Image (tube, rainbow, N blue to C red):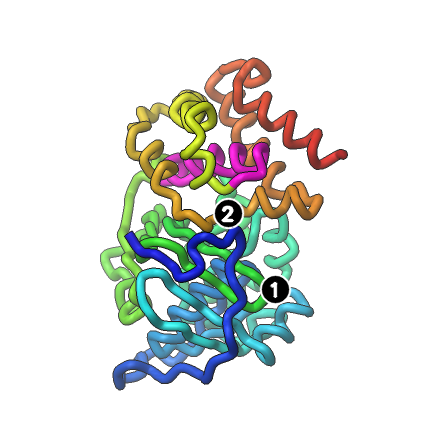
Amino acid sequence: MFFRKDIFNTKPAALEPEAETAEDEVRNPPSDTRPVYVIGDNALTCYLAAKLTDAGHDVIVIAGKENNLSFSTNGISLKEDSSLKLSRYKFNTSFWIKEEPKLVIIAADAGHVNASLAAVAKDKIGAAPVLCFTPLKDVNYIEAMVGGNLFRAFFDGYLQQNGQQVFLYGRTPQVKICKNVNWEKENPFPDIFSYTGLNVGYETDTVRCYWEFFAPYAVGSLLSALNNKNLFDITKDKQLRDQIPRLIAETAAIAAEGLELDCEPLVKKLYAAPMNYRFPLQDEINAGGYGEANLISSVLMNAARSAKIRFMDSSLNKILKQIYNLILV
């Protein structure tokens, strides 16, 4: 387990300005010089762009007007618990895909992904693979926009953004890439993600991967938002902690789709949340937003309908109602 100097702070401490970080070792630049486009303006966008930059790729971030300017002029600082490095990055930015890429990454929040995809043109993407990290249940409409080379991807890690500062809490994150129906023997991702430091794995069961990601994400988000407490603090309160296994089991039952999810590792994942980590929904509720709540609600309600489970009577729905009441206050 890794500990920060500011581990008892409720919010990430401000970082002192630092010099640009040089590469730790000299590496040959990637032979494929086409750019990697990362679409989004959140912590995951910054983190993936930073790691791909470390690996020597030409990374271009597509974000909103304000963040495009900020990423290219002010940049971001990245602090990782798993190392002593404090790195600073400035990214090349654009408002659309201008040239054929070797990879496109969609990392936008669910509430902003549709607007972000306005920057995407299928003819510009060509045959490049497209990784979608946005946790939508149905991405068929995205595939229609970007072409048949779309892959689902899931990020298992604890990222937090505070202005221009991005924090990665806890261990080195894992990325799961799900093989699509057009998967070929030639896997393009190992070369692209070489030297990024990311643990990248490949899966064939997209539905299982989705629910193994979404179940703890939804339960952690709902509990922390409702109680306005970090998940770490919730696990120290027996009454709140005891809700976690029940809510995970309820989510697993709703998931259905022929799945038999193993709930124990999903519960353990929530119990092991780093001290300072806050789920996006907790911050969003405090700011009067509702995009994350809408995402979680729609996924759970649609899944319950498909599984022929009465969602209105569930504990999950009761929590969602309370959260919407908080938003409306």
- Callout 2–callout 1 Cβ contact below 8 Å: no
Residue 97, compared with residue 269, is above or below; it is below
Range covered by the magenta-colored residues: 209-229
Q: Badge 2 is on which residue?
A: 278
Binning the other alpha carbons within 10 Å of mark 2 as few (below 14), some (14 to 19) or many (20 upward) gives: many
Q: Position of residue 133 (x, y in %)?
A: 45, 52
Which amino acid does the dot numbered 2 rest on? Answer: Arg
Name the residue at 41% across, 49% down. Answer: 152
Residue 250, compared with residue 152, is above or below; it is above
Q: Position of residue 188 (x, y in %)?
A: 30, 64
For residue 244, side relative to residue 179 (left or right): right
Name the residue at 53% across, 39% down. Answer: 229
Binning the other alpha carbons within 10 Å of mark 1 as few (below 14), some (14 to 19) or many (20 upward) gives: some
Q: Position of residue 186 (x, y in %)?
A: 25, 61
Which amino acid does the dot numbered 1 rest on? Answer: Ala
Q: Position of residue 203 (x, y in %)?
A: 28, 45
Name the residue at 59% across, 16% down. Answer: 312
Is residue 198 something that shows in the picture? yes
Label 2 vs label 1: CA separation?
A: 30 Å
- Where, quadrant-wise, is the C terminus in this rendering? top right
Q: Is residue 34 magenta?
A: no
Residue farthest to the left, as pictured:
185
Question: Which circle marks residue 119 in the picture?
Answer: 1
Q: State the image quarter where residue 28 is shown.
A: bottom left
Q: State the image quarter where residue 296 is shown.
A: top right
